[in-house]
Image (tube, helix red, strand yellow):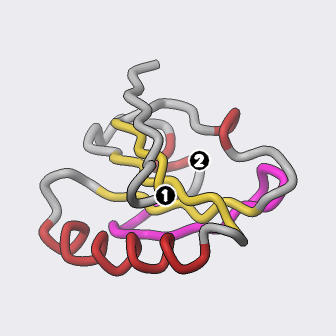
Amino acid sequence: MKQSIKPGDTDRITAFSDPDDISPYLSGDRKKVVLFAMSTCPYCHMFEERFRDFAQSRSTDYDFLRVIIDDPGNPLWSRYEIHVVPQILVFANGQV
């Protein structure tokens, strides 16, 4: 599993770079708001600023993750039925 995790001290978003499995990070009592994006997507870049602002304003209520899924063979595309990016999913106890 390729992954690069960077805790977001300033933007309160944990960033993952093209992981195959994020399920270990989706469990727990707090809800997780996950942004799925591609590094080459201009719409994703524009949306990330709003996502970052929302994360800063609601970080006491939710955990925020940003997942870059550049590889079209990444199983996250089918596991979470991602057809377009950017896409946001909210998880509670590991379930969408």
Q: Crowding at label 2, few (<14), some or many (≥20) Cα neighbours within 10 Å?
A: few
| Viewer-nearest of discs 1 and 2 | 1
Residue 74 falls in image quadrant: top left
Q: Quadrant of residue 62?
A: bottom right
Q: Residue at x 39, y 21 (%)?
A: 2
Q: Position of residue 25 (x, y in %)?
A: 66, 39
Residue 44 coordinates in the image, percent (x, y): 25, 68
Identify the residue at image location x=50%, y=71%. 55
Q: Which residue is mark 2?
A: 79
Secondary element type, mark 2: helix
Position of the C terminus by quadrant: bottom right
* 89 part of magenta stretch: yes
Query: Seen in the image, is 12 located left or right of residue 43?
Result: right
* Residue closest to the eye, 30 or 17: 30
- Residue 75 belongs to the span the image colors magenta: no
- 78 vs 48, nearest the viewer: 48
Residue with the mark numbered 1: 12
Residue depicted at x 19% and y 51%: 39
Magenta region: 81-96
Residue 50: x and y in percent read: 34, 80
Q: Main secondary structure of the magenta part?
A: loop
Instruction: Quadrant for residue 81, please give it.
Output: bottom right
Q: Secondary structure at mark 1?
A: loop
Residue ID at (55%, 59%): 64
Tell me if 4 is positioned left or right of 34 in this view.
left
- Amino acid residing under circle 1: Arg
Distance (Cα) linking label 1 and label 2: 25 Å
Category of crowding for the residue at label 1, using alpha-carbon neighbours closer than 10 angstroms: few (below 14), some (14–19), many (at least 20): many
Residue 63 in the image: x percent, y percent? 63, 58
Task: Specify the amino acid type for callout 2.
Answer: Arg
Which residue, as the protein is rendered here, is positioned at the far front? 10
Q: Earlier in the sequence, mark 1 or mark 2?
A: 1
